[in-house]
Image (tube, rainbow, N blue to C red):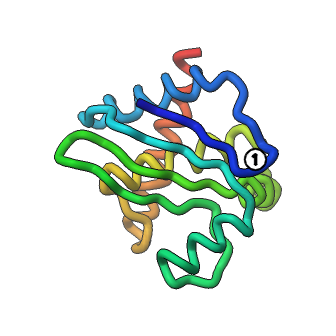
Amino acid sequence: MIDFHFESEFVLKNKSDYSDWISRIIVSEDFIVGDVDYIFCTDDYLLEINKVYLNHDTYTDIITFDYVSGKVLSGDIFISIERVVENSKIYKESFKRELLRVMSHGVLHLMGYGDKQDEEQEIMRKKEEEKIKMFHVER
């Protein structure tokens, strides 16, 4: 089950469109949909999680907690809406496209895709683009 929670003023419209899209991403990589929770929050909310759980004192756009068991994909994906807005300006992308990128990024992390090394980042970016296109194709 894909579920959405809001710890900021942001509210995702057409939740079923996003839920269906995330489910298709998961299935497209040969995983089974488990319990995936997206928590949309503020910078400060995510900073506190970063400090408490990861010992990092920095802002970030996303933190993913992995509860994957075999091929059943489960996890908590925290997304700072303020970082998504800022990144959309920096990268000259629409807010919606940047949101799709970050949402797909989180679920790709749960599938084992990394982004620490240059080669991993390149693969991650290609996968993000591939998954963003899935949102538009199915609409």
Residue 70 shown left or right of residue 82 in the figure? left
Residue furthest to the left in view is 70
Q: Is residue 1 above or below residue 86?
A: above
Q: Quadrant of the C terminus?
A: top right
Q: Secondary structure at mark 1?
A: loop
Q: Residue at x 49, y 23 (%)?
A: 20
| Residue 69 horizontal/vertical position (percent) | 21, 48
Is 75 left or right of 84, judged from the image as shown?
A: left
What residue does disc 1 label? 93
Q: Residue at x 30, y 56 (%)?
A: 112
The amino acid at mark 1 is: Glu
**Direction from residue 80 to residue 85 in the image, left or right:** right
Is 114 on the left or on the right of 60, as rendered? left
Residue 59's spot in the image, x, y percent? Answer: 67, 73
Residue 8, x across and y down, in percent: 76, 50
Total marks in image: 1
| Mark 1 neighbour class, 10 Å CA radius: few under 14, some 14 to 19, many 20 or more | few
Tell me if residue 96 comes above or below residue 120 in the rendering.
Answer: above
- Residue visible at 49% across and 43% down in the picture: 37
- Percent position (x, y) of residue 10? 78, 43
User: For the N terminus, which image quadrant?
Assistant: top left
